[in-house]
Amino acid sequence: MADQLLQQAQDLFERQIDFEGQKLTELFSTIILAVTGILAFILGFSQGNIWTTLWIGLGGTALTFLLVVPPYPIYNENPENWLRGNSGISGSGIEVDGKKIN
């Protein structure tokens, strides 16, 4: 039973994201952290309370974590088509200074 739960957790968290997904997560994290930082500063300053600033900043960081860290399927909409590997280098036709490398 524990092995099944562990396998489900691994399947959930070990997905891949593509390059466009990486750009999207970077954009999300930058925007959310900037907006919550500005909002935290304004509200904390207006209330004269440092705890308000810290809690809003912490909430923005937690929100960013929840939106960016898990590999949601939206982050893998443009997967790369990788080339298949060769069984070895021999016979690949690589030439260096006019000499074939085997």
Image: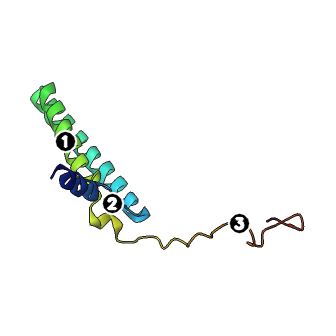
Residue 97 vertical placement versus 31 (above, below)? below
Please, what is the three-letter code of the amino acid marked with disc 1? Leu
Q: Which circle's residue, 3 or 2, is located before the other in the chain?
A: 2
Residue 94 figure quarter = bottom right
User: Tag 1, which secondary structure?
Assistant: helix
Disc nearer the start of the sequence (1/2): 2
Give the distance between the C-alpha atoms of the residues marked 1 and 2, in whole angstroms. 33 Å
In the image, residue 71 above or below residue 53: below
Q: Nearer the viewer, mark 3 or mark 2?
A: 3
Identify the element where label 2 is drawn. Answer: loop
Residue type at mark 3 is Ile
- Which secondary structure, mark 3? loop
Asked if the residue at tag 1 contacts the one at tag 3, i.e. Cβ–Cβ closer than 8 Å, the answer is: no
Disc number at residue 27? none
Cα gap from disc 3 to disc 2, whole angstroms: 31 Å
The residue located at (63%, 69%) in the rendering is: 87
Task: Select label 3 or label 1 by which is in front.
Answer: 3
The mark tally for this picture is 3
Name the mark on residue 39.
Answer: 1
Q: Which residue is mark 2?
A: 15
Q: Are marks 3 and 2 in contact (CB under 8 Å)?
A: no
